[in-house]
C-alpha cells in the first residue's frame, strides 16, 4: 500500500517537473537596480564599472540568460529605467501573466502595476516582495518584471476587445534550460 502511494507521488512529481520544464522558456525578465554599489560588494562587477556608473548615476538594467544575470542596458535615471520596464510589457505579445517584484519600493511597484493595467488585464498582474536572501545581492531599490507568455500563439482574451496577437520575440532575452532529476521511488 505504501509502495503504491510512493509510486503515485513519484509520478505526480514527474508531471510537475515536466510542467516546470515547459514553462521556463516562456518566462522573460527585465529588472532595474537603483545603485551599482551592492553589485560591486558582491563581486558581480568590477571597481571601474562601479565607479563610472556611480559618477554618471546610471541605473543598470538586467536580464537572465543561461542561468546568469546579464546587463540589458543602462538608464540615466530611475524613472527612465521604470519606463523601460513598462515598454518591455508594451512591446511584448502573447502575455499570459506578469509579476512585478520589488524589495524596498512597494509604491513604485504599485504605480508600475497601475500603468501596466492600462494595457493589460489587472487581474493577471501580480506584485511580490523580493526576499532578503536575493535582495542583499542588489541592494535596496530593485524592481524586476517577469512575463510569462501563453502556450498558444493566439491570445485567450482576444474576444475582450483586444486584437489577436501572435508570437513573442525579444532577441536579447534567453531563458536557460534547466535539467531536473528525481530520485526513483
Image: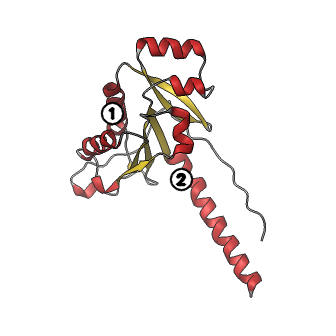
The residue shown at (41%, 34%) is 141
Residue hosting label 1 = 87
Q: Quadrant of residue 137?
A: top right
Q: Which mark is residue 134?
A: none
Please tell me which of labels 1 and 2 falls first in the chain. 2
Q: Where residue 115 sits in the image (x, y, percent)? A: 25, 41
Circle 1/circle 2 CB separation < 8 Å: no
The residue shown at (53%, 28%) is 38
Quadrant of the image for the N terminus?
bottom right
Q: Which mark is residue 23?
A: 2
Q: Where residue 34 sits in the image (x, y, percent)? A: 42, 28
**What secondary structure is marked by label 1?**
helix
Note whether 169 is above or below 54 in the view shown: below
Note whether 96 is above or below 71 in the view shown: below
The residue shown at (24%, 50%) is 162
Q: Quadrant of residue 160?
A: bottom left
The residue shown at (51%, 34%) is 173
Which residue reaches farthest bottom? 1
Q: Where residue 144 sits in the image (x, y, percent)? A: 43, 39
**What secondary structure is marked by label 2?**
helix
Q: Where residue 156 sits in the image (x, y, percent)? A: 34, 57
Locate residue 14 relative to residue 77 in the image: left or right. Answer: right
Quadrant of the image for the C terminus?
bottom right
Which of these two is toward me, 79 or 98? 79
Which of these two is toward me, 168 or 126? 126
Amino acid at each position: 500500500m505504501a509502495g503504491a502511494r510512493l509510486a503515485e507521488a513519484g509520478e505526480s512529481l514527474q508531471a510537475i517537473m515536466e510542467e516546470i520544464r515547459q514553462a521556463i522558456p516562456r518566462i522573460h525578465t527585465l529588472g532595474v537596480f537603483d545603485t551599482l554599489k551592492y553589485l560591486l560588494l558582491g563581486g558581480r562587477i568590477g571597481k571601474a564599472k562601479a565607479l563610472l556608473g556611480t559618477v554618471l548615476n546610471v541605473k543598470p538594467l538586467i536580464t537572465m540568460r543561461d542561468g546568469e544575470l546579464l546587463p540589458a542596458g543602462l538608464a540615466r535615471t530611475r524613472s527612465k529605467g521604470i519606463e523601460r520596464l513598462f515598454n518591455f510589457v508594451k512591446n511584448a505579445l502573447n502575455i499570459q501573466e506578469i509579476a512585478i517584484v520589488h524589495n524596498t519600493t512597494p509604491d513604485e511597484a504599485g504605480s508600475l502595476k497601475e500603468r501596466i493595467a492600462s494595457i493589460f488585464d489587472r487581474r493577471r498582474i501580480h506584485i511580490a516582495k523580493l526576499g532578503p536572501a536575493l535582495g542583499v545581492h542588489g541592494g535596496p531599490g530593485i524592481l524586476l518584471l517577469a512575463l510569462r507568455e501563453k502556450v498558444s500563439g493566439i491570445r485567450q482574451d482576444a474576444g475582450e476587445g483586444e486584437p489577436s496577437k501572435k508570437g513573442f520575440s525579444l532577441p536579447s532575452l534567453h531563458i536557460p534550460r534547466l535539467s531536473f532529476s528525481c530520485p526513483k521511488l
